Structures are given as C-alpha cells and as structure tokens.
Amino acid sequence: MKWKWIFLCLVALSAIAATMASGAYVARIGEDAGGGPALSTTLRTKGSIGGSVDGETKSTNWTGALPRTPIPPVVVVEGVSKPALTTGEECIISWHSTIDGYFYVEVGGNGTPGSGGRVDEGPCTAYVSIESKVYESDLPDNQDSPVYIIVDTGLGTPPYGTVTLTDDQIAPEFAAFDIVRIQGTVSDSSVTEVVIKVAGQPDWQVPVISGSYDCTTPLGLSPSGTTEVILEATNSEGKSVQRKIKMW
C-alpha cells in the first residue's frame, strides 16, 4: 500500500512538470528600422496540458516599423526690440527655426517667399538664434505692417513666423494760441461790457470800467495766418455796435 501511494505521487509530479513545460511565451524586441522604431515579436508554444513534454513546437515571427507622426518645423520669434518705428529708427527681431534651411525676411505679402518686400535673407541652422533688422524706411508710412520670417527647406510649404511693426510718423495735433491784449474806450456810459468774438471759439465778456475796457486773452490762430476779431458793445436801450479787427 505504501508503495502504491509513492507511485501515485510520482505520477502526479510528472503531470505537474509537463503542465509547467507547456504553455506559451512572447518575446518582443525593439529595433531601429530607420523610419521609426521596429518591433520583432516571437510567439512560441510547447506541449499541452496533460500532453507529453516532447510535444509539438510552433512559432510565428513578425517584424515591422511602427508608424511615427512627424513634427512639422516651425519658426519661433524670440523677441522684438521696437514694435513702433519713427523716422530713422530700426527694429531687431530675434528668432530661430527648428529646421535647417534658407530664410527670407519680408515686409507684407502672405508668408510665401517673394510675396512681400525682402529686407533680409541667408542660411539658418536649426535652433540657432538669428537677429534680423528691419528699418523704418522698409515699412509703408503711418500704418501697421506684417513682417514674415520664412524658412525654405526645399520640401513642401515653407514654415514662417510673423510679427507686426508700426510706422508712426503722424505728428501730434495741437492748437496754437497767441496771447493778445485788447483795450479801448466806449463813449456810451450805459455800456457795461464789450464782447470779444472769434470764429470757432467761445466769446469773452470784458467789463467796461469808467468808459474803458482792457483784457489779455488767448486767441486761436487761423490756419491761413489771419484771424478776425469782432468787438461788440450793447447799451441800455439794446442797441449794439460792432467793430472788426484783423490779426496775423
């Protein structure tokens, strides 16, 4: 009986060993296939549960390049020294490309080489900073203009970066005044004030004291160089009289 149990145990151990020897495993090997990482896969199976250790062996192999999404090249503007220019000034644009190529800096256009006015050009190396100058004289007067930095690689549509520069030559507007002293006399003692009138400006009321008036007032100069001033006096009966003087 004892030997019988020993025999059964040996049979059970053999079955477990056969089961462990059977089954499957997968080997995956990553490789560089030029166009992207490659994957080599081997699947092997050996034996079967309850079968012999020397069972049939099967394997399958597959190797191929995994797809890789390309990153498009770009032009990165790092800085603009002076976005608004007046006569004689210049702007320095700092930038770099993420790909080697030949660059063009153009004012106006649409980002296609030759569509705008070219102000700078030359070879460029990926990730190496370049400084390009744009002068006020390169820009149309008194307006905003797009500036394109285009990198031509000879393949496909060239990438570009863009900034906006402003040509500002508009002089500030201001009103010019002349400080004028106006004085005189009035014969009618009932007149209490003289009104000074200039076209396009508010009236000034100047009091009459002991038959005389005297004031110092700013008068806007006429663009033509001549300014007409009207003096008006009204007595107690409502009768008015005007006098005109011209200044230039």
Image (cartoon, rainbow, N blue to C red):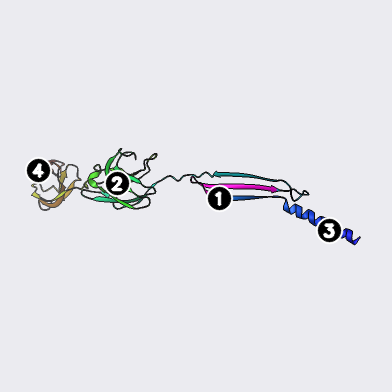
Tell whether 90 sits left or right of 74. left
Mark 1 or 2 closer to N-term?
Answer: 1
Tell whether 49 sits left or right of 74. right
Please tell me whether mark 1 sits on a helix, a strand or a loop: strand
Q: Which residue is mark 1?
A: 30
Mark 2 or 4 closer to N-term?
Answer: 2
Please tell me whether mark 4 sits on a helix, a strand or a loop: strand
**Mark 4–mark 1 distance (CA, rounded to whole Å):** 97 Å
Q: Which residue is mark 4?
A: 246
Q: Are marks 1 and 2 in contact (CB under 8 Å)?
A: no
Checking the image for residue 5, the label placed there is: none
Checking the image for residue 122, the label placed there is: 2
* Residue depth check, mark 2 versus mark 4: number of the one nearer the observer: 2
* Residue depth check, mark 4 versus mark 1: number of the one nearer the observer: 1
Please tell me whether mark 2 sits on a helix, a strand or a loop: strand
Residue at the image position 29 percent from the left and 39 percent from the top? 116
What x and y, as percent, mark residue 147? 31, 44
Chain part drawn in magenta? 31-45
